[in-house]
Image: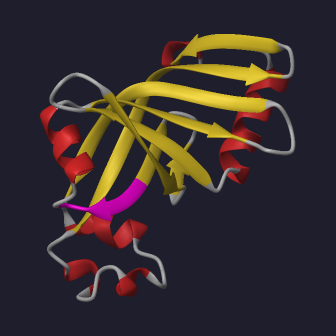
């Protein structure tokens, strides 16, 4: 992949405030939910905080296949990443993702039993930009 496109993808990830996360339900249908972008590690690893006892979390535990989508309103750009979602409950990740203001959702702080982390690891992606489109895999980087 050319450096210019990679830079555009990185900028989209850095500036997107919301990701649309999709899981697969028990009947095999996609379910999509908007979640705040909390933290990323490069292009292929993204983290989100959520409730351990949520229906979507249970879907990821049953079937880790997932996708995330980020876009901008100011420019015709969108990034879809396809991979697997892990549900993490270890203290290291819970502390790593903790942000001021979370206490209104998780009253016992990082020790809240219902607080967990979703770790998405992409295997491949699709980047749409203007009239262009490029499909890539993690091996391309």
The answer to which image quadrant residue 135 occupies is top right
Identify which residue, 65 or 45, lies in the foreground. Answer: 65
Q: Residue at x 39, y 34 (%)?
A: 121
52 above or below 137?
below
For the point 56% across and 35% down, the residue is 69
Where on the picture, by quarter, is residue 42?
top right
| Residue 25 percent across, percent down from the top left | 22, 32
Determine the residue positioned at 30% across, 58% down.
117
Q: Of residues 13 and 73, which is closer to you in this image?
A: 73
Residue 23 belongs to magenta span: no
Where residue 4 sits in the image (x, y, percent)? 85, 25
User: Of 21 and 11, which appears nearest the observer?
Assistant: 21
Quadrant of the drawing holding the C terminus: top right
Task: Look at the picture and state if 24 lies above or below 18.
Answer: above
Q: Is residue 25 left or right of residue 16?
A: left
Magenta segment boundaries in residue numbering:
48-52
């Amino acid at each position: 992949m050319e450096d210019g496109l990679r830079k555009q993808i990185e900028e989209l990830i850095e500036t997107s405030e919301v990701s649309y996360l999709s899981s697969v339900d028990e009947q095999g249908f996609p379910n999509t939910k908007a979640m705040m972008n909390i933290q990323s590690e490069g292009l292929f690893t993204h983290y989100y905080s959520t409730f351990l006892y949520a229906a979507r979390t249970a879907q990821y535990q049953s079937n880790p296949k997932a996708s995330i989508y980020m876009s901008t309103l100011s420019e015709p750009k969108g990034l879809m990443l396809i991979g697997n979602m892990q549900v993490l409950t270890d203290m290291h990740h819970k502390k790593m993702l903790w942000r001021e203001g979370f206490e209104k959702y998780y009253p016992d702080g990082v020790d809240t039993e219902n607080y967990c982390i979703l770790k998405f690891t992409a295997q491949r992606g699709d980047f749409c930009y203007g009239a262009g489109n490029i499909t890539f895999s993690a091996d391309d980087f």
